[in-house]
Amino acid sequence: MAKETPTASCEVIDTTSDGKGEPTNLCVFSGPMKAHERIKRTAAYAEDPAGYLQKALGKETFESRRSMLSLPETVDMDAYGTGEHRQHFEQHIASFLGKQHGLFFVTGIQAQLAALKTHAERAGTTKVAWHVSCHLEWAEARSFETLYGLERLLLGSDPETLPTVDEIQRVLSLPKDERPAAILLEIPNRVLGCQTYTFEELQKISSACREAGVALHMDGARLWEIEPYYQAMGGKSFADLTALFNSVYVSFYKGVGGATGAMLVTDDESLIDEAKLWQHRAGGRAFTLGYEVIDDERGFNENVGTFARKRDKMIEVVDAVKAATAEYESTDGRKIVNFEPDRPTCCQILTVFDGFTEEQLMDARDKVQAKTNVRIFDRLRPKETVDADADEDIQADGDPSGSVNKKRHFKEWMIMSVTEKIETRVFVDAYVGLCKELVGKAS
């Protein structure tokens, strides 16, 4: 069971191609819909959720997934957080993830910081800990510090890899007054190409946190996407994963495709009560979030149960592209096309292009598109080393800043409902075409 990921680092355009119209775009993060179409879709769902889903999914799929779906008896607009539909959705997501209580937030920033601040106040400290690639570190203008008064400890010694179990245990072994109140782990880690821990590693970390009296919080923005990895590696479910954490945040606008929104889930009802206070203080207690709740539930219902096949498609595409492009190298002997991680953990990954400038890559992309009507990517970013000392130097698109290699660029992309319909050979032919344009090899 699982769902979709990344933030929109690629422009959304039509992915159908007849050789004349819009190109087949291999890098999109949401379907090409206009604002009024999105609102109509949400209204159609609100009017008859079950009927909408039977039509969108097909009756057979609807019935096979029924136990996963959040099917409300009433769809209403909440008022300051109360309302039948909102409470139904919160309870369904919490139960689906193996927790007892849930609280809907308009943003993940509010959800995570409410949880971390609550953990910190309970422990009587301001210290929390995470890796330098953590979203709170590079994408939130240091709100943890300036608004919540939290002080962070950095986990791990290598900015390009996940903190090891031993490195986390060393932090947990600090004198009690130096320990963090909570450790945040991003499962999977977006900046590192969706690298993640094995289930056994998570068990060790969770046990060490309990022994040290330190809360363990999951940034599960892409939990929907990564659950199939844990299923494939050891038959582990959402509930198996979340049982190792005191609190978990999930997102609804990424892979799930909802309007915007997040949820904090936990077994600790009092943590939810305290998080509500911080939600209010942060301006998150809106008069109504009815539209967001309705559309997020729609997105969840449409996408839950699809992430295993999207992961399989990503593995198939990456394996095929790697094999087809292995012979193509830049002048300094580096393979042109690389993936991080080398084997996908889920339906999202980073493709890294080595040995060429952005201008050269864009020019080659345009030549491939002119010949095939296939667009490999829209934007590229320089592949930088995550820099723990560059907290204030954040790129405009929200990526951690570090030392720039002008001949190393990457794109973040995923297999989603639109792109999973594209044949693998289309990906392969496009990447091979790009390599040929770059090195000037003839067919």
Image: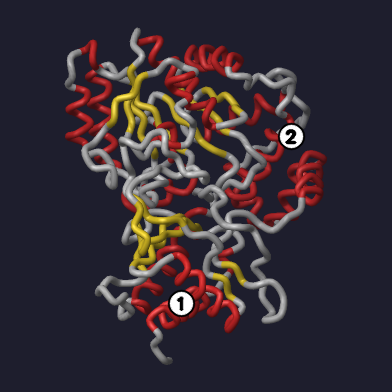
Quadrant of residue 206 within the rendered picture: top left
- Depth check, front residue: 390 or 432: 390
Return the residue found at the far top. 124
The residue that appears at 21% across and 38% down in the rendered structure is 157
Q: Position of residue 194 (x, y in %)?
A: 39, 49
The residue that appears at 70% across and 40% down in the rendered structure is 295
Q: Is residue 27 above or below residue 282?
A: below
Per the image, label 2 sits on a secondary structure element best described as: helix
Q: Which of the colour schemes (rainbow, by chain, secondary structure, one colour) is used?
A: secondary structure
Tag in front: 2 or 1: 1
How many residues crowd mark 1 within 10 Å: few (<14), some (14–19), many (20+)? Answer: many
The residue that appears at 73% across and 55% down in the rendered structure is 33
Q: Is residue 260 above or below residue 383?
A: above
User: Would residue 311 appear left or right of 78 to someone viewing this image?
Assistant: left
Mark-to-mark CA distance, 2 and 1: 42 Å
User: Would residue 204 appear left or right of 307 to someone viewing this image?
Assistant: left
